[in-house]
């Protein structure tokens, strides 16, 4: 059996070095003008520098160009794609078909990963986008384990699944926080908090707290819990999932590094020493994560063991 | 300022007078067979309906294949067409039965499907090639290059994301030769459609398969987290954080959309009443017809705008068509229902010799109430209700049974499908 890739989201160029130490195999970076909800902001120079470091370590770097594009960003997208080609990153994450078009027009040879988040829900779509150039599909977080496994069994592309971190639930083009402060005639509050990503919505009925922030792409709202599958990885290993992702958006560098290392240990235990070795250590790894887990962010297993109705 | 697209397909000059040669389709929602008939009768060129599978709005009545066939026959008599929404993002388990379903829709005479998932696009092309394929707004289509992508994939039409503005539509039309459908009226998502799973996370109901519980319409409290301390960002008595958008209303932008060459103007609302559909469709019908007949002397009439307000139960705004929406296009704080008129009855028959209307009751009314009749064949008029009789000819003091058949005297002629509304005091 092939070891799955451990994919993480660094916050800075320096952070990448720590994450290589901690055992990450691959990295998602980029900037908000082209990519959605990134853990860190990396301009083109940063990407170039990061790529050098990552490639020297024999690891992979993927750049997010998965924004929902409007006409006004298409010209800049072309330039950006050419920059990425020159730098030689290992993959481009996309959701918008405009990226597929631009890549074809410009003769970009970087592999594509299809990552539209919420709508990647069945294996037919995976194969559809594979025929149009996607080497990998990143599945929606709102799928059950059975659905994930069935997709992998029928997919012609690599499959990436999130195993840890929060889930983006919502993207509006509107400035929802700004509008709330404007409505209350508190323009200063917007200025004071523009760069802060520490706000949340309290849902009293469900006792949930949903992180919320604004950027170039609009307003983003996140799940109240952090997904954590550190002790539930066996079936994903057996299914042969190609990449396990830890999305570190809105987490600290220290947290991301520690959690990355826990997943490294889990993957190595299973693949180097067998299922029993993993079973023996998984509770300990979970405890380790629980120790550093922020009180405001309960852990759960996402939709892996939860069905949705409609 | 109207932006004109240079295109002789949209307009020409006849005897020194400009006329619009490309009239856009007026597309209405129809949650049931009755609503379909009303929409077509009141002037829709096309209706979109939901079937019993593969569509969003799992709470709507939705059509059986037999009802679709009947709906298509009714619509075709008026020269109108029917589209079926099959716009879920499927999970693996939803793949079963898709081929048979699409073939049945095709067999019922439906013109096209509105679809988001490539699974359904590709399956339709393979098993039901006579159906047109329209890309749903669930694909958040926001730029001309993506429009070009779907054109190359062989789609007949794209429905744009609701976040697309006039200038962006102009560029899409210039760059790509494909039919464009845009929303003009009704409730809308505040998120990019398809990119919201609040409902999944809050209530385990899948929004992209029709289970949306409308979490975006709820109130929340906004806090900030400062070093582990939770600090409220509101004071006692402040309106809570809300993300509910005002409903879309682009009645005054219709001329601009026509000049841009938008192919289909879409009204949202498969869950709305026949009164709502009749009112909205008839007003948009009048505006489109008046503008196309004489664009240079067109002026929107105050009475059209007032008429449209009669069925509005929420505040309205222009959203992204006219530029980025401000906070004034959202609903904050307490919002009382705005409806000034209630739908009170549907005309079944009118006897010219006795001046007696036969009406199906849709809301409580009694002698002395001020009511208004409207419909495509008549000019709206108000009157006071006199004596009322039931089906057996017994005089009644009040019409208070839903769907009860009643009769009373109306001096002016009425026609089947005309509607009666009552002022809400």
Image: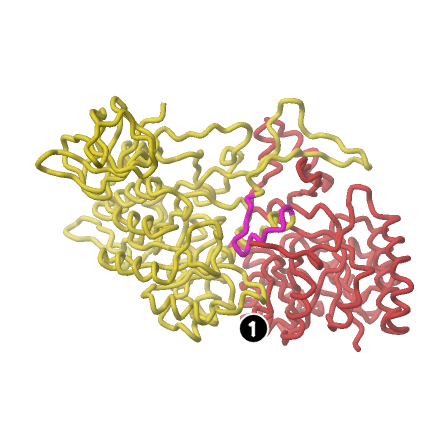
Chain colours: A red, B yellow
Residue at 83%, 59% in the rendered image: A260
Judge whether B216 appears above or below A87 on screen: above
Observer able to see residue A217: no
Q: Is residue B205 magenta?
A: yes
Instruction: Give neighbour class at mark 1: few <14, some 14-19, many 20+ (Cα, 10 Å).
Output: few
| Quadrant position of residue A65 | bottom right
Q: Which one is in front, B105 or A118?
A: B105
Horizontal arrangement in the rendering, residue B353 relative to residue B157 (left or right):
left
Asked which secondary structure carries label 1, the reply is loop
User: In the rendered image of this protein, does residue A197 appear above or below residue B137?
Assistant: above
The picture places residue A14, in percent across and down from the top left corner, at 84, 56
In the image, is B223 to the left or to the right of B124? right
Decide which of A129, B66 is in the foreground and name it. B66
Asked whether A288 or B323 is in front, the reply is A288
Q: Which residue in the protein does label 1 denote?
A: A132
Instruction: Tell me which residue sits at (48%, 37%) in the image.
Output: B246
Q: Nearer the viewer, residue B340 or B98?
A: B98
The answer to whether B193 appears left or right of B376 in the picture is: right
Stretch of the chain drawn in magenta: B202-214
């Amino acid at each position: 059996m092939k070891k799955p890739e451990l994919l993480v989201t660094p916050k800075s160029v320096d952070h990448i070095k720590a994450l290589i130490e901690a055992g990450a195999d691959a990295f998602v970076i980029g900037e908000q003008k082209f990519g959605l909800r990134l853990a860190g902001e990396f301009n083109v120079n940063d990407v170039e520098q990061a790529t050098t470091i990552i490639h020297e370590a024999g690891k992979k770097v993927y750049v997010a160009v998965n924004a929902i594009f409007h006409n006004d960003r298409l010209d800049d997208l072309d330039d950006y794609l050419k920059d990425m080609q020159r730098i030689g990153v290992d993959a481009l994450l996309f959701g918008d078909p405009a990226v597929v078009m631009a890549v074809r027009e410009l003769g970009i040879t970087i592999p594509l990963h299809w990552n539209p988040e919420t709508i990647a829900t069945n294996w037919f779509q995976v194969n559809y986008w594979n025929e149009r150039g996607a080497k990998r599909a990143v599945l929606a977080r709102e799928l059950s384990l059975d659905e994930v496994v069935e997709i992998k069994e029928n997919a012609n592309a690599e499959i990436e699944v999130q195993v840890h971190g929060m889930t983006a639930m919502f993207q509006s083009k509107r400035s929802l926080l700004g509008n709330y402060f404007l409505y209350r005639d508190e323009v200063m509050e917007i200025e004071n908090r523009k760069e802060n990503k520490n706000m949340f919505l309290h849902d009293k009925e469900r006792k949930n707290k949903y992180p919320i922030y604004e950027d170039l792409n609009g307003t983003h709202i996140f799940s109240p819990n952090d997904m954590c599958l550190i002790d539930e990885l066996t079936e994903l290993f057996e299914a042969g999932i190609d990449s396990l992702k830890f999305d570190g958006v809105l987490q600290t560098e220290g947290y991301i590094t520690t959690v990355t290392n826990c997943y490294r240990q889990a993957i190595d235990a299973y693949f180097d020493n067998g299922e029993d070795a993993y079973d023996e250590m998984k509770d300990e790894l979970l405890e380790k994560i629980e120790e550093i887990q922020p009180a405001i962010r309960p852990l759960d297993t996402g939709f892996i063991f939860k069905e949705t109705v409609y | 300022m109207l932006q004109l697209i240079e295109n002789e397909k949209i307009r020409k000059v006849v005897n020194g007078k400009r006329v619009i040669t490309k009239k856009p389709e007026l597309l209405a929602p129809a949650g049931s067979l009755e609503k379909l008939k009303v929409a077509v009768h009141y002037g829709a060129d096309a209706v979109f309906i939901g079937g019993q599978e593969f569509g969003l709005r799992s709470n709507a009545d939705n059509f059986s294949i037999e009802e679709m066939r009947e709906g298509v026959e009714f619509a075709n008599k008026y020269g109108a067409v029917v589209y079926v929404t099959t716009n879920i993002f499927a999970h693996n388990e939803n793949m079963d039965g898709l081929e048979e379903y699409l073939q049945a829709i095709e067999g019922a005479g439906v013109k096209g499907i509105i679809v988001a998932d490539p699974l359904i696009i590709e399956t339709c092309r393979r098993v039901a090639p006579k159906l047109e394929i329209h890309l749903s707004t669930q694909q958040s289509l926001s730029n001309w290059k993506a429009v070009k992508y779907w054109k190359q994939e062989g789609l007949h039409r794209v429905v744009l994301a609701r976040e697309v503005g006039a200038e962006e539509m102009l560029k899409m039309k210039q760059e790509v030769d494909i039919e464009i459908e845009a929303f003009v009226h009704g409730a809308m998502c505040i998120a990019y459609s398809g990119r919201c799973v609040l409902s999944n996370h809050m209530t385990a109901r899948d929004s992209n398969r029709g289970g949306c519980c409308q979490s975006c319409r709820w109130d929340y409290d906004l806090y900030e987290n400062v070093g582990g301390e939770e600090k409220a960002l509101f004071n006692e008595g402040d309106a809570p954080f809300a993300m509910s958008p005002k409903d879309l209303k682009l009645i005054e932008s219709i001329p601009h959309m026509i000049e841009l060459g938008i192919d289909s103007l879409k009204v949202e609302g498969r869950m709305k009443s026949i009164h709502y559909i009749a009112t909205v469709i008839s007003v948009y019908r009048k505006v489109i017809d008046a503008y196309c007949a004489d664009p240079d002397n067109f002026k929107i009439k105050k009475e059209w705008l007032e008429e449209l307000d009669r069925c509005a139960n929420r505040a309205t705004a222009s959203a992204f068509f006219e530029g980025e929406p401000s906070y004034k296009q959202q609903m904050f704080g307490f919002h009382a229902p705005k409806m000034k008129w209630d739908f009170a009855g549907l005309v079944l028959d009118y006897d010219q010799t006795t001046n007696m209307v036969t009406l199906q009751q849709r809301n409580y009314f009694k002698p002395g109430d001020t009511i208004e009749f409207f419909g495509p064949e008549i000019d709206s008029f108000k009157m006071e209700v006199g004596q009322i009789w039931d089906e057996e000819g017994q005089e009644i003091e009040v019409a208070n049974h839903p769907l009860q058949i009643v009769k009373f005297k109306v001096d002016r002629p009425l026609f089947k499908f005309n509607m009666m509304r009552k002022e809400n005091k």
